[in-house]
Amino acid sequence: MDASLGWYDALCALHGIGCSVIDGLWAAHQAPPPLHSAVKTAEPWVTTSAAVRALRGVEHGSIADSFGRLDPRGVDLLDLLFEARWIHRPPAERARVVPPGWTRVVTREALTAWNHLSGTTEVLLPSLLHLPEFTVLAASPTDEPEVMVAGAVLHRAGEVLSLSNVWSTPGHDLDWAELVTLAGAIHPGRAVTGYARGASLELALDAGFADVGPQSVWAR
């Protein structure tokens, strides 16, 4: 949960957007970065009415319920956008050899291509590459190193790593165990957290992640 709030704080700072946590609710002071909620519960005791009030004034905003407890159906034109599960994995042993084909994205041109494939062109801005707490990863076939087939982002938040923006191209089976190995190699000794749903959740659980609770997002 704290790692997710850290991600939101960092992304808002990247976009020059102020944010704060008041009465158990994280909120952006203006429209949040694309694909991100304007309001996010930071404590389990936050009520539905309080979350909806915090969202008012944001034309196309959404509420990220970090604990899966809110039920704003029919309130202020909010509908369930998706449900997911928080996942957590203890620190992996430090790998001496990283999985083949994986590299860090370190140039503006590579990030542009990565964003195009993952649908995050207006989210992960080029200035992110200069922030040491972020690591953008891309996978390529060993015989086609110029072709990206998968990616993920690691964000260091204190002693925990947030794993997000995991994607792969059609026909490529992403191995979540490789992501665990990469996390342990780049940031040894840190637990990894994030959220997943559907087939990605099953792959994460198979790679040693534990399901630690629900998350839901409500949007207009």
Image (cartoon, helix red, strand yellow):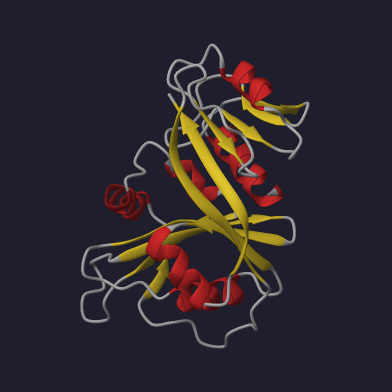
Counting from the top left corner in percent of width and height, residue 155 is at 59, 55
Counting from the top left corner in percent of width and height, residue 63 is at 55, 31
Q: Quadrant of the C terminus?
A: top left
31 up-or-down from 121: above or below: above
Counting from the top left corner in percent of width and height, residue 41 is at 66, 35
| 183 vs 142, nearest the viewer | 183
| Residue at image location 43% in from the left, 82% down from the top | 99
| 172 vs 109, nearest the viewer | 172
| Residue at image location 52% in from the left, 19% down from the top | 75
Is any atom of residue 8 visible in this view? yes
Counting from the top left corner in percent of width and height, residue 125 is at 43, 40
| 44 vs 14, nearest the viewer | 44
| 17 vs 211, nearest the viewer | 211
- Residue found farthest to the bottom: 96
| Residue at image location 61% in from the left, 43% down from the top | 68
On the image, which quarter does residue 23 sit in? top right
18 up-or-down from 65: above or below: above
